[in-house]
Structure formats: structure tokens, C-alpha cells
Image: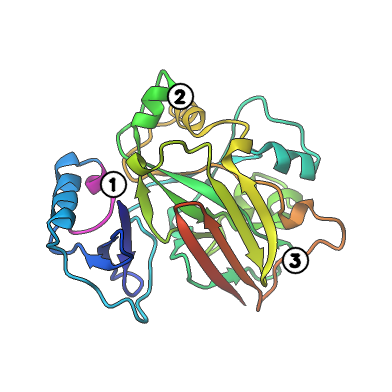
């Protein structure tokens, strides 16, 4: 199923995009798309049954904002340097274990919302990423099969990054990752049953119409299953938590000088196979 949340920011309603591309209202079936829903097999079953029975009213999509497909996110766990080609382009050594950092949940915005270039930023960068959404509480998972069984679904994510803040201002990466609006998510959450192989998804990103990233999750150093298993050894993952699993080659950081970092007025578009497309215009904060 393709689960969405639509409407003005802070007042989104749950929705479903059916096989014909019609947006369907879920507000009469479930209160929202959140961790509680994803952990409730019976509630998900009610959505499926209502959709199959043709009981869900259509929504007028004209001018309707698409919000992030998940409400009440507890934490956004991020994996750095998780693509072989991205490590090569930046001259970084391959990590022996996954690199973990965090984005605050309040960085998450809708897939087409405005991204703000931070004040004094000179190195705002783009990163298309596969987001994993957790559906069952995960602690000390013991196998890849067990890890994937705890995944509720997947979404397209944009891990916007300020490289000077991240890499040149000392301290952790987090200060370059947590600026306002730095994690567009969506447009939809695709349930895991419709993603038979998360290691076979194409990812693309354009800046002002020019293709910058054209990769595949097959290039991941640590697979989705390994990332979920590994992270669960260090923290508890709860339904509705999100893991951004890294970006392929093609970011501004890996380009020759002068590096084409983002500025106000730029337009970023990205898509992941089966997970939909995003479009953001950048403005100054």
C-alpha cells in the first residue's frame, strides 16, 4: 500500500494512493499514519479491506499539499558513507562498521515543501536516500531475516546537509544535518510487502534539471537488513522510527572545484524507484 498524509502543515489527514493513481481518504478508517498504526496489523488490515471493497472516498488532489507520510516520528537515525561509489568520490575509506548520526524529527517536512538554506551557509548539499520505517519494536536483532521482519515500509528521503557545518566547524556531524527543513520525506510510505528486494532500487536526483545522482541501493556497503540489525544492538528502535540509509555518488561534496553547492532559487528533484518523486525550491532562511 502507498500511505500518505495530505493537507496543510500540522493538519494533515491520512490517505492512500490506489493502483489507478486516485488519492483516497483514510480518515474514516484510521486517525493517522504513525507508529501506532504501523504496529497494528488489524488496523492495516482494515485499510486493505476498505480499499479492496471500494469504500474509500476519493480526494481532490488539485492544489492539495502532500505532507510527510509519517506522523509522530520518534527519531531519525542516519547512516553515513554507506555507498561504495559515494566513498570513492569523496576519497573516504570504507567504514568497517556503519557510521551512525542523527537528525531531529523536527527536520522532517513534506516532499515538496520549501528547503531553507541556513544563514551563513556556503556549502548546502543534496543527498537522495532510501528511508526505512520501523514497524515493530526492535532490540538486539539476531539476523537479517529478523531485521527485515521489523520493517513496516520504505520512503524517499532527502538528507540535506551543510558541509561546512558538518565537517569544518569541529564536533559531530549533527550540526550540519539538523538545520530547519533538512529532511523532506515522502511522498508516500510504501509498505514492505511491496518491496521484495530493498537492495535493488534506483535512486536519482536533479538540481535545476541536471541529473546529479544516478545510483542503486545495490551499491550499499551495509544492506538495509544489516543496518537495521546493527542499529538495534545500540538502541531500541520503535514503530515509527526512521533510518536514512545513505546516499550514492553525485553529491556536491564529491564534485571538482568550484563545488556546485545549493543556493536560494535552486530547485532539487529526486525519486526512488516505486517510492515517488520530490521537488523542493530553496529559499534563504
Q: What stretch of residues is rendered in magenta? A: 30-38
Q: How many marks?
A: 3
Quote the CA–CA distance across marks 1 and 2: 21 Å
N-terminal-most mark, 1 or 2:
1
Q: Nearer the viewer, residue 163 or 223?
A: 223
Residue extending furthest front?
20
16 is within the stretch colored magenta? no
Q: Position of residue 249 (x, y in %)?
A: 70, 48
Which-is-in-front pick, marks 1 and 2? 1
Quote the CA–CA distance across marks 3 and 2: 37 Å
Q: Which residue is pictured at 57% across the width and 61% down the height?
A: 270
Badge 3: how crowded within 10 Å, few (<14), some, or many (20+)?
some
Quote the CA–CA distance across marks 1 and 3: 36 Å
Q: Position of residue 193 (x, y in %)?
A: 33, 40
Give the secondary structure at mark 2. Answer: loop
Q: Can you say which quadrant of the picture contains the C terminus?
A: bottom right
Give the secondary structure at mark 1. Answer: helix
Residue 233 bears which disc, if any? 2
Q: Is residue 105 above or below residue 15?
A: above
Amino acid at each position: 500500500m502507498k500511505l500518505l498524509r495530505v493537507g496543510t502543515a500540522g493538519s494533515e489527514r491520512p490517505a492512500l494512493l490506489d493502483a489507478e493513481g486516485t488519492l483516497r481518504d483514510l480518515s474514516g478508517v484510521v486517525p493517522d499514519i504513525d507508529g501506532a498504526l504501523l504496529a497494528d496489523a488489524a488496523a492495516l488490515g482494515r485499510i486493505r479491506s476498505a480499499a479492496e471493497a471500494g469504500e474509500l472516498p476519493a480526494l481532490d488532489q488539485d492544489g492539495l499539499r502532500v505532507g510527510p507520510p509519517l506522523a509522530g516520528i520518534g527519531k531519525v537515525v542516519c547512516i553515513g558513507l554507506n555507498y561504495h561509489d559515494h566513498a570513492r568520490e569523496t576519497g573516504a575509506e570504507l567504514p568497517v562498521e556503519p557510521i551512525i548520526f542523527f537528525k531531529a524529527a523536527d527536520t522532517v517536512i513534506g516532499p515538496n515543501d520549501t528547503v531553507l538554506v541556513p544563514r551563513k551557509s556556503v556549502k548546502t548539499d543534496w543527498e537522495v536516500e532510501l528511508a526505512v520505517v520501523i514497524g515493530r519494536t526492535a532490540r538486539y536483532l539476531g539476523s537479517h531475516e529478523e531485521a527485515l521482519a521489523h520493517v513496516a515500509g520504505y520512503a524517499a528521503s532527502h538528507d540535506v546537509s551543510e558541509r561546512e557545518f558538518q565537517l569544518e566547524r569541529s564536533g559531530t556531524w549533527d550540526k550540519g544535518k539538523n538545520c530547519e527543513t533538512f529532511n523532506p520525506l515522502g511522498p508516500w510510505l510504501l509498505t514492505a510487502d511491496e518491496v521484495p528486494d530493498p537492495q535493488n532500487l534506483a535512486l536519482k536526483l536533479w538540481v535545476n534539471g541536471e541529473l546529479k545522482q544516478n545510483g542503486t541501493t545495490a551499491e550499499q556497503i551495509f544492506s538495509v537488513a544489516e543496518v537495521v540489525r546493527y542499529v538495534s544492538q545500540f538502541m531500541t528502535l520503535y514503530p515509527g522510527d526512521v533510518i536514512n540509509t545513505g546516499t550514492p555518488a553525485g553529491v556536491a561534496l564529491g564534485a571538482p572545484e568550484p563545488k556546485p553547492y545549493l543556493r536560494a532559487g535552486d530547485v532539487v528533484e529526486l525519486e526512488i524507484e516505486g517510492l515517488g518523486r520530490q521537488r523542493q525550491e530553496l529559499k534563504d532562511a
